[in-house]
Amino acid sequence: MAGIASNAVELPRYISRHAHRPRSEAKRSRIVDIAMQYFAEHGYHAARVGDMAATLGIAKGSIFQHFGSKDGLFFEVYKRAVRSFPKYLDALADVRAAGFFDVLYYWLVRTEHLLHEDWIPYRISLLGNYGTDLVLKREINRFLIAEDPYGTVAFVRFGLERGELRKDMDVEMIVSILDWTMERFQDALLTAELDPGLFRRQGEMPEKKEARIRQFLAVLRRAVGVASATPAPGRSEPRRIAVANLIAKPNVP
Amino acid sequence: MAGIASNAVELPRYISRHAHRPRSEAKRSRIVDIAMQYFAEHGYHAARVGDMAATLGIAKGSIFQHFGSKDGLFFEVYKRAVRSFPKYLDALADVRAAGFFDVLYYWLVRTEHLLHEDWIPYRISLLGNYGTDLVLKREINRFLIAEDPYGTVAFVRFGLERGELRKDMDVEMIVSILDWTMERFQDALLTAELDPGLFRRQGEMPEKKEARIRQFLAVLRRAVGVASATPAPGRSEPRRIAVANLIAKPNVP
DNA sequence: AGCCATGAATGACTCCAAGTCACGGAAGCA
DNA sequence: TGCTTCCGTGACTTGGAGTCATTCATGGCT
């Protein structure tokens, strides 16, 4: 690991200092692609920069030339992975029209499909959230704050404008609650390994999952939803969305 | 890193296979002590096993003899750190008598004091939660599930028995919600670095923190508390606890 | 075309920390 | 005292991150 962790004054090397030529940009992109596969497949530590270079048919030094360090490479990979995820408001228009909590429901159910289609970026985000050094994690958090890649802030405003969320809370509090619980709940849904607490007893029964999702959303609704919108039990919980809709791609830009 | 990450069948080395002699136990303990300091101070990667050995005045090989790998050593350190934390129900008896949410309030306010008294174990738990390899993280999660070191399950039962928590939710769901949000909220309170989202604007203003804590607890109460106990605004929120009480040690066993 | 300047690529090299192991010594035991 | 078992040791191996002097490619300029 480079001397990033020290109390040095200089910036971490992986904050790129100058714009890159278009030619080089294509190569960077190729490297990030392959690196993403390696990190996803082997985890951060077991992924070897040398192997990536070999696969790409280039010299290891080249990779360091471009990204400065393994951390720097991973950071780029992480950014790309996270940016590839849809934002909350990318849900289909009619789902969006149905309201804030229906959008959440939509994504929770869809997540699994997204995962099976393409597990690599998800695994990368998992590594970034839990499986690297704290120093890098700090950089990652800065990035998440700066970019809000899931569009949580806009989504919360959307909910506020529709009068579905409480107005007596700071927006940041709602955003944080949403980010925290959604992240952990999705992890629990997807990786029984990482967080077996919620799903350890039963072996993946889908209708149990469905029930969990509904229960979780009910909790969220009570927590941050406006009181008047809290539905009588059984009535206005999000309608089950037809499976066909769930499998269709969302309108990602 | 040892070959733990591979799909080998054998157990990770750091699951100790045989009971240890008492003589050796004392030494193990000394090693864990020093290692905890090093990990806390430098982070996982930057902490050098060689340095620890030098400080202890023993050979590096000895450490590996005892713990098998750096991961194994860290796992022991992590367990000790986490076990040193108080459980929810270790709150003072009169706080406990005041009820479920008062206990939460008590701990959220106290956390800061605990931290300043002894930041090392906290930093270790942070490393375990976010700053190591995913493989180790899995082991850590197993441990957390098996030991429930904060006594969350017992605490939730306590809340249920007092009629302060909703009976229409699975216990695991309440436990998970509580664990997730409390962990993240505490991290946000304590390390503006790690999660600057909630506290980035203002610079540590204590009354702002106090307000955040109350707001957060109100959210939790709505989320998992029984509807009847939801207080009229301003009335039965947890009473401010006298500072003298907060600085006293809790009755940790 | 020929020439130069700048950026990109190379791969052999260094560095360094994790992890190993054959050996010597101490402690328990008869 | 002799035997066994465990412990500690430190020189050693391994292997991957990161470096750098050199070579190569590109594209602008006259």
Image (cartoon, coloured by chain):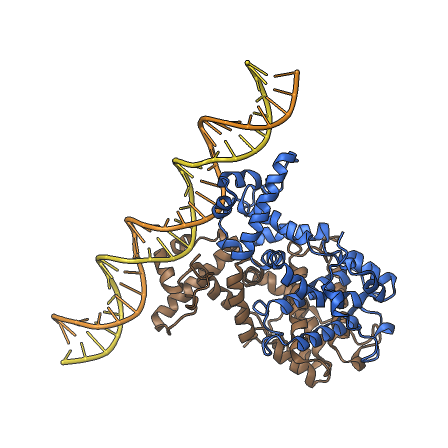
Chain colours: A brown, B blue, C orange, D yellow
Q: Is residue A8 visible to the viewer in this orientation of the structure?
A: yes
Residue A241 in picture, x, y percent from top left: 71, 72
Residue B79 in picture, x, y percent from top left: 65, 50
Residue B29 drawn above or below residue A16: above
Q: Of B239 and A87, which appears nearest the observer?
A: B239
State how many labels appear: 0
Q: Of D17 and A249, which appears nearest the observer?
A: D17
B16 with respect to A199 (left or right): left
Q: Of B242 and A154, which appears nearest the observer?
A: B242
Return the residue found at the far front: B244
Q: Residue at the location (86% across, 72% down)?
A: B229
Residue A238 drawn above or below residue A161: above
C9 with respect to A227 (left or right): left
Point out the image quarter for the C terminus of chain A: bottom right
Residue A5 drawn above or below residue B54: below
Q: Is residue A238 visible to the viewer in this orientation of the structure?
A: no
Residue B247 in picture, x, y percent from top left: 72, 64
